[in-house]
Amino acid sequence: MIVKSYEIQKRISDISKCNLFLLYGENIGLKKDTKKKIEFEIKRKNSNTEFSSIYENDITENTNNFYNSIYSGSLFGTTKVIAVNNGTDKIIKLIEDITKKYPENVYIIILSEILDKKSKLRNFFEKNPKTICIPCYLDNSRDLEIIIVEELKKNNINLARESINLLVEKSNYDRDNLRNEIEKIKSYALTKKSIGIEEIRCLINFSGEHKSDNLINECLSGNIYQYKKILTELYTNTINQIFLLRILSNKMRRLMNLKEKEMENNYNNVDSLLNASKPPIFWKEKPIVKKQLTIWNIGSLTKTIDEINNIELLCKKNPQISKIIFFNFFSDICKKAKNFS
């Protein structure tokens, strides 16, 4: 059955009566939050709970081990929660079999990327009354504003509307990024509960992040000289590759949404399209977004977004060479953009 992400908290006790969950979509932060809520409720009902996490390829490479982990008794607890990362249609037969046998005290949470309407895995979870399917679409401004207000309210911190808007914009519409900024504010506000807009600007706009954002924009625009210049400065520093990959993914998804809107509606020009964008695009960024729209088409955007997911997985599995994998991938994108333009 289908359950909306915003219904989770209200229906959590009913939802946790099911054993199999599918969380799919591009919103990584929302999937993490939803998974935590489900796990918390299971743990609340069963204090002696064992948690484990695997990837789909671990299952397909050794199916017997997966079955054993489900049907064998737990060594450390009476209840098992198994998270399956990067789930696709490859495991549909296994899931169908497990649902028929429906093991007690074993919960399976599958985390997937975007699944289209033809996906066998998505269709199975949507239609089966014993399973829960939770779409995790991108956050909008309202979703992020609620997170800001709720988090700061817990610490009695007051922010003006202008500061809240700035935080939403700076997050790149990613709740994980947003929470990082909120943590900075909470640390800063230990001795004061009201923070002005200029203080917020100083807290969230340091040079490293500015360079990272510029790196991605120059990369998508095919500006090889500027890209290499920023790359040289960043390469010597410690950077969060996963963070940058997700910003890249968000920017490309925004371009895809704009391209789709351009096809669906008759805009007089690109400027009209940008002005009608929801969420709004910051005026300073409009020229570079306009250039990127002329470079990338829907096909190349879709292909590259899929590649980003694979690169993130490679970086996680190969931490020793993750920086090389990351920068080679970004350089390839910049070269493609240069050739497209």
Image (tube, rainbow, N blue to C red):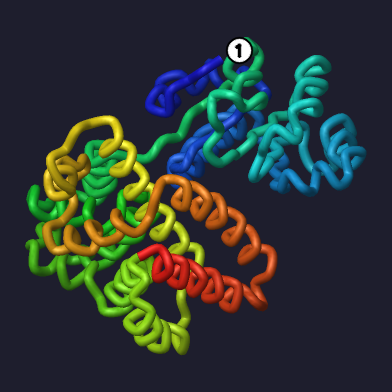
Task: Tell which of 260 and 251 is nearer to you.
Answer: 260
Q: Is residue 318 above or below residue 182?
A: below
Query: Relative to 308, is 223 above or below?
Result: below
Q: Position of residue 184 (x, y in %)?
A: 29, 65
57 left or right of 1 in image? right
| Residue 317 at x, y percent in the picture | 69, 64
The reply to whether residue 48 is in sight is no
Residue 145 left/right relative to 327: left
Tell me the residue at 34%/59% (across/down): 295
Q: Quadrant of the N terminus?
A: top right
Assign the C terminus to one quadrant of the image.
Answer: bottom left
x and y percentages locating residue 300 in the rendered image: 47, 52
The image quadrant of residue 30 is top left
Q: Is residue 220 above or below residue 322?
A: above
How many dots with numbers?
1
Residue shown at 8%/62% (left/top)? 197
Hey, what amino acid is under mark 1? Lys
Graded by Cα atoms within 10 Å as few (under 14), some (14 to 19) or many (20 or more), the crowding at tag 1 reads few
Q: Nearer the viewer, residue 237 or 277?
A: 277
Residue at (15%, 45%) from the top-left corner? 269
The residue most toward the right is 64
Q: Secondary structure at mark 1?
A: helix
| Left-right relation of 308 to 203 | right
Identify the residue at horizontal 60%, vertical 12% (top origin). Answer: 127
- Compared to residue 52, the image places residue 313 above or below, namely below
State whether residue 225 appears in this view. Answer: yes
Residue beneath disc 1? 127
Where does the image place residue 290, in percent across and percent down from the top left? 22, 57
